[in-house]
Structures are given as C-alpha cells and as structure tokens.
Amino acid sequence: MIVSKANAFKPFMLKSKTISFQMVNVLLVVVFFSHITWAVKGSSHCKQTDPGEIRPHSVTITEFGAVGDGVTLNTKAFQNAIFYLNSFADKGGAKLFVPAGRWLTGSFDLISHLTLWLDKDAVILGSKNPDDWPVVDPLPSYGRGRELPGGRHRSLIYGCNLTDVIITGDNGTINGQGSVWWNWFRSKTLNYTRPHLVELMNSTGVVISNLNFLNSPFWTIHPVYCSRVTVQNVTILAPLDSPNTDGIDPDSSDDVCIEDCYISTGDDLIAIKSGWDEYGISFARPSTNIFIRRLTGHNRNGSGIAIGSEMSGGVSEVHAENLYFFDSSTAIIIKTAPGRGGYVRNIYISDVTLAGVDTAIRFNSNFSEHPDEFYDPNALPVIERITVKDVKGDNIKVAGLLNGIERDSFRHLCLLNITLNVTSESPWNCSYIQGYSALVSPETCEPLKESIYPKHYSDCYHLSDPLHNSALRHLS
Ligand SMILES: *[C@@H]1O[C@H](CO)[C@@H](O)[C@H](O)[C@H]1NC(C)=O
Ligand SMILES: *[C@@H]1O[C@H](CO)[C@@H](O)[C@H](O)[C@H]1NC(C)=O
Ligand SMILES: *[C@@H]1O[C@H](CO)[C@@H](O)[C@H](O)[C@H]1NC(C)=O
Ligand SMILES: *[C@@H]1O[C@H](CO)[C@@H](O)[C@H](O)[C@H]1NC(C)=O
Ligand SMILES: *[C@@H]1O[C@H](CO)[C@@H](O)[C@H](O)[C@H]1NC(C)=O
Ligand SMILES: *[C@@H]1O[C@H](CO)[C@@H](O)[C@H](O)[C@H]1NC(C)=O
Ligand SMILES: *[C@@H]1O[C@H](CO)[C@@H](O)[C@H](O)[C@H]1NC(C)=O
Ligand SMILES: *[C@@H]1O[C@H](CO)[C@@H](O)[C@H](O)[C@H]1NC(C)=O
Ligand SMILES: *[C@@H]1O[C@H](CO)[C@@H](O)[C@H](O)[C@H]1NC(C)=O
Ligand SMILES: *[C@@H]1O[C@H](CO)[C@@H](O)[C@H](O)[C@H]1NC(C)=O
C-alpha cells in the first residue's frame, strides 16, 4: 500500500525539475499524509438547514399594499407586514412571502423568528434614492464609517438583536441597483459610507440560502457580531470593476458556515474581518470557527478568500476547502498593517484549484488605511499557524507574495502539496515570514524551505476537534 502511494507521486516528481526527494522522505510524507487525511475526513459540514421549514403563519407582501411594478416604492408595505408579523414571533414565527414581481423598496428591518421568502421570479430592488437608506451609527469596532467619518447608510435588508431569522426562497433575487452608489463613490460625492445589501448585526441563528444577490452598493452580505450563521447555495454577482462589492464578509462573528456558493464581484469574494485598528482592538470580538466549502468564483480586483484587512479583534479557526477560483487577481490573502494589532491564527485551507490567477497566495502587510490618527503604529498583528495544502493551479503568474512586517512574527506558515504552473521568473517573494513546506512546486522561497516532516509537523495547524465540534453544534 505504501508502495502504491509512493508511486502516486511519480507524475509530480517527473514534472518538476528541482525535485530531490529521497525515498525516505517520500515514505515519511506518505505516513504523515495519511494522518492528515484522517484528520480532514473527521471534519464535518454545516448542519443541514431546512429553509422550507414551516412557519405556522404566513402573509404575502401584496396584502400590505405592495405593487410589484418596479416603480412603486414598497418600503412601507415591507415595514407594515413585518410589524404585523411581530405578533407571531412567540407563536413559532411567521413567513413573509414575496411573489413574482419587481418590488422596489428602501431599507427595512427584519424581526426574530421570521422567514423572508422570495419566490421564483421575485426580485427585490433597492431604491436609487439615498434618502431611502437611513443613516445609522457607525459600528463600535470600526469607530466610524468604513469609507467616511461619521455614520453609515443602513443596509437594504437589516436586522439587529435577532434570533432565528431566515432569508430564502426559490431562486428569487435581491438586487441593490448599486451603480448609483458606485458612481457617487467614484465622483467622491458620498456623504456617508455606502450601505450593504444585507446586514445582520448582533444576531444568532441566521440562515441565508437559495437566492441571487446582485449589485450591492458596498459589501453584499455582512453578518457582524453574529453567532451561528449559515449561508448556503447562493449566487452573488456584481461587475468585476464595481468598487468594494465584497461577497460575504463575516465580521466579529463566530460559528459561520458558508457552502455551495458562486460569487463573482468587484472585490473579495469572502473577507473575514473583526474591526479596525484601536476600535477593533478595544471592542475585542474575534471572528472564529468559520467554515467554508465548495466555493467557486472570480474577481479582477480582489481575492477568493481574504482575511482582513480589518482584523484587529482577531481571526482564528478558519477552515476552507474545495475552492475553485478562475480568472482572478488573487486567490488567498491575509491583509494587515502596523496599527491593526489583533491576530490571525489557526487557518487551514485545502483542496484549491486555480486557473488564470495572478497571485495564488499573498500576505499583504501594508494596508495603510487607518480610521484616524489615533491608531498605535506599534500595535503589530500576530500571524501564525497558517496551513495551505493540496493546491493545483494552471496559468498562475506568481505563486506567493508573502511579506510580513519587520520585527513582527508571521510564523508557522505551512505549505503542503502545492503544484502551480507559474509564468513569473520569480514565483515566490518572501520577507519577514517563517515556516515550512513539503511537496511544493515551484520550489519555495528560502524562509519556507525547511521540511514539514518530521520535525515541524506539530507546528502546522490542522483541523482540530474544537472546530469540528462547533461546526456540528451549528444550529442544533
Ligand atoms: C439592540 O440591543 C441593545 C441592548 O439591548 C440596544 O441598546 C439596542 O438599541 C438594540 N438595537 C436595536 C436596533 O434594536
Ligand atoms: C439551490 O437553490 C436553487 C434555487 O436557487 C434550488 O433550486 C436548489 O434546489 C437548491 N439546492 C439545494 C441543495 O438546496
Ligand atoms: C436561478 O436564477 C438565475 C438568475 O435568474 C438563473 O441564471 C439560474 O438558472 C436559476 N437557477 C435555477 C436552479 O433555477
Ligand atoms: C449629499 O448631501 C447633499 C447635500 O445635502 C445632497 O444634495 C446629496 O444628494 C447627498 N448625496 C448623497 C449620495 O446622499
Ligand atoms: C447585542 O445584544 C446584547 C444582548 O441582547 C446586548 O446586551 C448588546 O448591547 C447588543 N449589542 C449591540 C451592539 O447591539
Ligand atoms: C481596485 O481596487 C482599488 C482599491 O479599492 C482601487 O483603488 C482601484 O481603482 C481598483 N481597480 C480597478 C480596476 O477597479
Ligand atoms: C506601503 O504603502 C505605501 C503607500 O500606500 C507605500 O508608499 C510604501 O512604499 C509601501 N511599503 C511597502 C514596504 O511596500
Ligand atoms: C495533492 O493535492 C491534490 C489536489 O491538488 C490531490 O489530488 C492529491 O491527492 C494530493 N496528494 C496527496 C498525496 O495527498
Ligand atoms: C503549464 O503551462 C505551459 C505553458 O503555458 C503549458 O504548455 C503546460 O501544458 C502547462 N502544464 C500543465 C501541467 O498544466
Ligand atoms: C520582491 O518584491 C520586492 C518589492 O516588490 C522587490 O523589490 C524584490 O526585488 C522582489 N524580490 C525578488 C527576489 O523577486
């Protein structure tokens, strides 16, 4: 059996010019690989959710005077329907049904124990009038609006302090009509930070599934200070040149599960965050237990999976697998800067396929946007125990741009079984990082050359039981 596994390496060894593994090394690798494989097999899934779950009460938006002509503003109808359904919150909850039609609306507020259900051919359209998106307080972990000082426009679909809220349907669409906002951004005529398409704040038990999300003014789905969030089977689209239209941004949230999504936007497809500089440090709410699988997508000015750049409350226990990114700028990135503080640790990314990607893996430590001048330039982020394994890529420009921060610790980066067809003359560019590697082609940079096996295996993060268990706990 060991022999046949060793044979499996042959194609890899023949392809690479610089391979110099001795048989002993290969055997060691095989032994440890089996170990890792076992650990990953033990990994779990998002708990299966049932968005078709019957709520005992249901109303249709037309019962509240809504008109689905794409012209009539239906904000009042949504607000009245949800106000009415509030009386069912303690009776098992209720469903607000949105039938086929084009339902123009401004921002509205969800409640606990609510299912917002968009039928096939139902389209909720965001108003193009900024007055329909009221201005609310900035997030305490950011200290100000992300784009401009002061407040920020409230998301189209918003919820705060909720439990058990579901946004789902039969492939309906929520379209932010964000181009007006992108133009205000480009012409610098915004008065406040742009709104998200969907934001759930301080909420527990959130499910978002089986829908299309289009043209968000800013980040598309933003769970912030939330627990037990599931995003399943959604398509998120925005033009590749639309500014900051991130797909899903879990922010200071835990037990988040994202699976079976297709995302193509103008910025990061998924960006895991936790607050900005001194505000994020003092709010101190990390993002942890984030599970991502079966994500496909592309971008031209962002990344597939990003951590940061706002990571000042810490990010840990992230497990991402089965990722496919094509025609993209960057696949995997950690973004930070002096002043952020916080940490990024225990990150495990595996089974990644890349096609036509400029940079496969990047650490960018020079995100020099700060909320104000009061940040502490000596607050250095701790970046450690980052494992990236089982990556193959074709038509890649650069394998890794891995730049840490002088006098800081970016350590225990582990690269395992990575095969990239790279066009650049210098495929890896590393500074101020430390780590280990095995079975990486093209050959890694000097600071990562030491072999993972046998000595450093325990320095490399791999899926551990706490993450496994918390994913199982999900929504139970
Ligand atoms: C959320 O709960 C907090 C604490 O009870 C309260 O101060 C805040 O106003 C609530 N926010 C909303 C939007 O209900
Ligand atoms: C995914 O969503 C589509 C509608 O958008 C639905 O037809 C399909 O059944 C969903 N798949 C799963 C596994 O729920
Ligand atoms: C869902 O809607 C999108 C956009 O309208 C469409 O492209 C896709 O084929 C639909 N999928 C299903 C399963 O109906
Ligand atoms: C910004 O404020 C000005 C002055 O109140 C107003 O005319 C303009 O419409 C506002 N722009 C946006 C995008 O809200
Ligand atoms: C979040 O909810 C908790 C408990 O309901 C409350 O104490 C806290 O003030 C809320 N925080 C925010 C930012 O709304
Ligand atoms: C890419 O994003 C950066 C930062 O948001 C922006 O400055 C730049 O103009 C964007 N480029 C394109 C081509 O959209
Ligand atoms: C960091 O970014 C600033 C401007 O954004 C640039 O001037 C500086 O050269 C960059 N530093 C490094 C080390 O890349
Ligand atoms: C290396 O990664 C590829 C996917 O890129 C996978 O098919 C292969 O099984 C991995 N090799 C080992 C020995 O695990
Ligand atoms: C790598 O790229 C070269 C040139 O683009 C191509 O000829 C070759 O088939 C590629 N190899 C693999 C294994 O994809
Ligand atoms: C790495 O990148 C830096 C900055 O972009 C550049 O100055 C340096 O020459 C590169 N090093 C190598 C070995 O390519």
Image: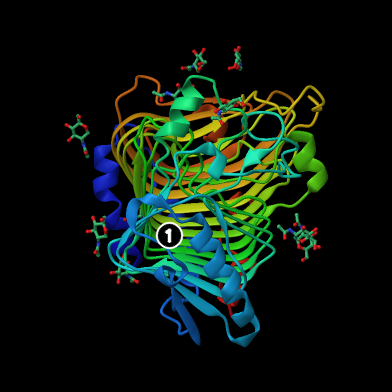
Quadrant in which the C terminus is drawn: bottom right
Ligand 9 rendered quadrant? top left
Q: Residue at x 34, y 41 (%)?
A: 298
- Compared to residue 441, the image places residue 295 above or below, namely below
Q: Nearer the viewer, residue 93 or 386?
A: 93
Q: Nearer the viewer, residue 44 or 154?
A: 154
Q: Name the residue carrying label 1.
A: 293
Q: Residue at x 70, y 29 (%)?
A: 149
Quadrant in which the N terminus is drawn: bottom left
Whole-percent x, y for residue 392 in the image: 33, 45
Whole-percent x, y for residue 125 in the image: 40, 50
- Mark 1 lies on a secondary structure that is strand
Taking the image as shown, residue 404 lies to the left or right of residue 323, namely: right
Q: Residue 394: in sight, yes or no? A: yes
Please name the amino acid that badge 1 sits on: Arg
Whole-percent x, y for residue 40 in the image: 48, 66
The part of the image, by quadrant, that contains residue 17 is top left
How many residues crowd around disc 1 within 10 Å: few (fewer than 14), some, or many (20 or more)?
A: many
Q: Nearer the viewer, residue 282 or 354?
A: 282
Q: Residue 452: in sight, yes or no? A: no
Q: Nearer the viewer, residue 404 or 339?
A: 339
Q: Residue at x 28, y 56 (%)?
A: 8
Taking the image as shown, residue 403 lies to the left or right of residue 276, namely: left
The part of the image, by quadrant, that contains residue 159 is bottom right
